[in-house]
Amino acid sequence: MGLELEYTYGQTPLEEEEKEGLLIKHITTKKELDEFEQHNIEKAIEWVMVRKLTMDNVLNEGFALGLHKRMLGEVWNWAGKFRTSNKNIGVDKLQISTDLYQLNQDCKYWIGNKTYNPDTLAITYKHRIVKIHPFANGNGRHSRLMADIIIEKLLDHRIFTWGKVDLTQKGNERKKYIDSIIEADNGSIQPLLEFARS
């Protein structure tokens, strides 16, 4: 029996070949998968918490890939690698590296020139990286952790609360979160800013 996934609102489906990258073969349900992924992500958060990180450490392709690997590398063999298929959202797979490089350069400029207040800067970065959609899966969780790293480690402010719920699960908060991303896609970042602090 293989991995059977039921996707919630706003989740990007995995290709069959991506599902084959599951390292823990006895996982068959989304609930089991969520538990293993969450355990792995908690280890990545602990790793981040004890690190002194600088702009040069964080705002580069290697850090983005390495963080994703720390978050999901015990569960998926493709963790820490850019996706190799195009999805229903995100840039073309061949544009990922270029667009991520541009985002990191933009973010360095924003920090150096105080272009935005800290919340707006971190959430703008989060929105842009999730819009690039670098990975087969875990893009939302990765982008939220990146925003938390930027706001806390680089800008010395409190991390975000993200609705105070598990956003991988169905529910009203997840719907508000996804809707706020769609509004940001349409040019209004304010709902996503408000959600991040809710």
Image (cartoon, grey):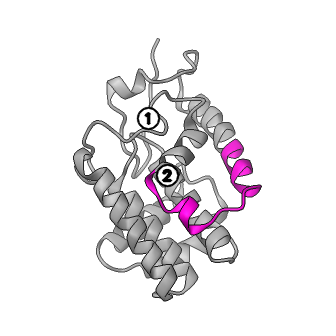
User: In the figure, is residue 15 to the left or right of 52?
Assistant: left
| Count of numbered marks | 2
The x, y position of residue 38, in whole percent, is 64, 41
From the viewer's side, name the closer residue of 159 and 81.
81
Q: Residues within 10 Å of mark 2 (few under 14, many from 20)?
A: many
Given contact means CB atoms under 8 Å apart, are the residues at marks 2 and 1 in contact?
Answer: no
- Magenta range: 42-61
Residue 51 colored in magenta in the image = yes
Extreme-top residue of the structure: 1
The quarter of the displayed image where residue 33 is located = top right
Residue 147 falls inside the magenta stretch: no
Q: Looking at the picture, does residue 160 appear above or below residue 190?
A: above
Which of disc 1 and disc 2 is earlier in sequence?
A: 1
Question: How far across and how far down the image is residue 66, in percent?
Answer: 54, 45
User: Considering depth in this image, is 187 or 119 the residue closer to the camera?
Assistant: 119
Disc 1 residue type?
Answer: Glu
Give the label on residue 64, or none: 2
- Give the quadrant of the C terminus: bottom right
> Left or right: where does residue 132 sit relative to residue 192?
left
Cα–Cα span, label 2 and label 1: 27 Å
Q: Is residue 169 above or below residue 193?
A: above
At 37% from the left and 42% from the top, the residue drawn is 82
Instruction: Please indicate, yes or no, whether residue 53 appears anywhere in the rendered image.
Output: yes
Q: Quadrant of residue 18?
A: top left
* As drawn, 94 above or below 40: below
Q: Which residue is mark 1?
A: 6
